[in-house]
Amino acid sequence: MKKNLLGKVLFTLFLLSSLYSCKSRVESSAVGESFTWDNATVYFVYIDRFFNGTSSNDENYNRKNDYGNETKNVATFHGGDIVGITQKLEEGYFQKLGVNVIWITGVYEQIHGWVGGGDKNDFPHYAYHGYYPMDFTAMDKNFGTIEEFRAFVDLAHTQGMRVVMDAGINHPGYLTLLDAVQYKFGGVDLTEDEAVMHYDGLNLEGKDSLEHYQIYSYLNHFDFEDSQNWMNWWGDSWIRSSEEVDKDVLTESIFGLPDFRTDSRKAVGLPQLMKNKWASEGDEFKKWVNPSAQKYRTDLDIAQSEYVIHWLAAWVEEFGIDGFRCDVLENVDTFRWVELNKACNEALSNWREKNPNIAGANWSDNFWMTGDIWDAGIDFNEEYAKAGFASIVNFTFPKDGNLLSIGTTWQNYSDNLNTREDWNTLSFLNNTYKRDTQNSDMMNCGTSLLLSPGAVQIFYGDEVGRKAVESNASDPTHGFRSDFVWGTNPEMLKHWRKLGQFRNNHHSVGAGIQTSIGENTFLREYDKNGHRDRVIIKLTEDELSVVELRDIYEEGTQLRNAYSGEIAKVEDGKVAFKSVNQVLLIEEVR
């Protein structure tokens, strides 16, 4: 590794922020065949923060979980795992919420050690979030084994749910002391136990806080002068030097992360880090290695990004993963996204052909891709649509739960999204980057989100108003990703479940065309591919609300308020229902 790149990493680390922060296989089921991504209800799960299914995998790679206080522990691994998510599937948690897509953070083996947290290095920042991958071909032991992951995907498919994973081809994880000791790079003269100690910036009294050599004092253990010390890391053929980064958005080194050469078409061998790592693994490590990636754990004489694309598509080939949420689209050359989309569609087709009796194999939808462009809205993006993306994550969805104005937003989404066949959106209230809602608004926020046209994303715990942890850490982002506290806010959960079930039962909610038929009263209609559906949504503060139907339903037709279960007949072109929580969800009784 070049000295100037090491200097770049050293300098940018002081700016580090946490923005980046068993069942047997089952028979195929008809459940999930009636599905459209345009009406997807996506549940975004932070694996490590959701539910601890087994404590047997809580400590791995000599990581340290407990540093003695809440601030120090805000970004350590907390124990959540794939077994925990599977248990919640078995309990029917996601089905009761109307979820039809589960999006999980990356399961790939992460860097083993920590980097300095926040702008003060006042806590150790581990890769619990799955955004700092080291080995794309293996499961991180903290998340689970290959067979545990297979059980999770198969069960989700059996329940009619697609599975989406985080995926990125722009960078690996940071350098850490623990990885340097374990894989012998960087000239670090420490034991593993010493490498997991938190070398913080508390020796700064009376000094300028911008003296990053002192704030990130753990970096003093690296030898940045001798290039020979870096032969066992990623190497210059894989990551950009400091002269090449930050010239434009494509070459940006995001928060100092090593930036893969996604533009390069030059064939290279494996990085020495991977060669050494894989050579050191015994047979017992097969429990965590993706079998479909095994053939890509060798020198292939291809470009850097092509290795990563093979490694990612192998998860689709092995498990039938249905889609990827792709990280920082503009930081990767677009032709690489085209290649990833092609590889994953081929891998999904191969999985379906090889597993004809497994749930999900009879589904015909293409591999689905969405991704992030900071502050993007719902506008059609031709470049990424041609690259295979179905949508871009929508950062602009209203976060205030204002039911008096949300109808205007819904109409805009319907007019601009559901009249197209080649583009949609993925709207959210909260996500991995920021928390914009107030807990007191989460009932109405749930109404506005789950009844919105287009695909929507529930951030884990939104349905119970999960609170952020106030830890006094210099970076609050990790507090946004607090542990799910189970059993809280049952009334709020009940509200979200009613909305989610209604949405999941009716394509017209997310994928239909909206027509205003009265004050805060909206007809949604869907008629595609032989599937016809029609509902009426009304937002009202009136205890008893009369809906003018405009000949939409014939006289005597029985209608149901799906929220309360109340049934009434159409009389004189009208129907009346009692409203609960300011909403009527009107469907035909069949």
Image (cartoon, rainbow, N blue to C red):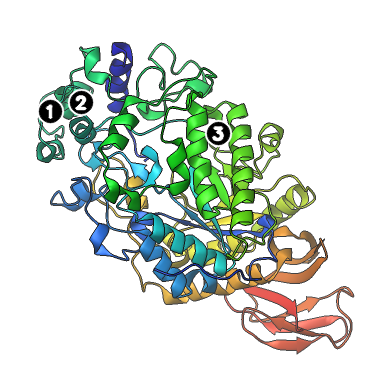
SS of the residue under disc 2: loop
Examine the image and state in which quarter residue 158 appears: bottom right
Q: How many labels were placed on the picture?
A: 3
Label 1–label 2 contact, CB within 8 A: yes
For discs 1 and 3, the disc positioned in front in the rendered view: 3
Q: Earlier in the sequence, mark 1 or mark 3?
A: 1
Residue 187 vs 538, above or below: the answer is: above
Distance from Cα at disc 2 to Cα at disc 3:
33 Å
Q: Considering the image in quadrants, where does the C terminus appear? A: bottom right
What amino acid is at disc 3? Leu
SS of the residue under disc 3: helix
What amino acid is at disc 1? Leu
**Tag of residue 204:** 1
Residue at 65 percent of width and 77 percent of height = 542
Residue 19 vs 302, above or below: the answer is: below
For label 2, the residue is 209
63 or 118: nearer the viewer: 63
Examine the image and state in which quarter residue 208 appears: top left
Taking 67 as reference, is 307 left or right? right
Residue at 41 percent of width and 35 percent of height = 297
Distance from Cα at disc 1 to Cα at disc 3:
38 Å
For discs 2 and 3, the disc positioned in front in the rendered view: 3
For label 3, the residue is 329
Q: Residues within 10 Å of mark 1 (few under 14, many from 20)?
A: some
Residue 130 in view (yes/no): no
Distance from Cα at disc 1 to Cα at disc 2:
7 Å
526 or 167: nearer the viewer: 167
Label 1–label 3 contact, CB within 8 A: no
Q: Earlier in the sequence, mark 1 or mark 2?
A: 1
Residue 202 vs 413, above or below: the answer is: above
Taking 210 as reference, is 94 left or right? right
SS of the residue under disc 1: loop
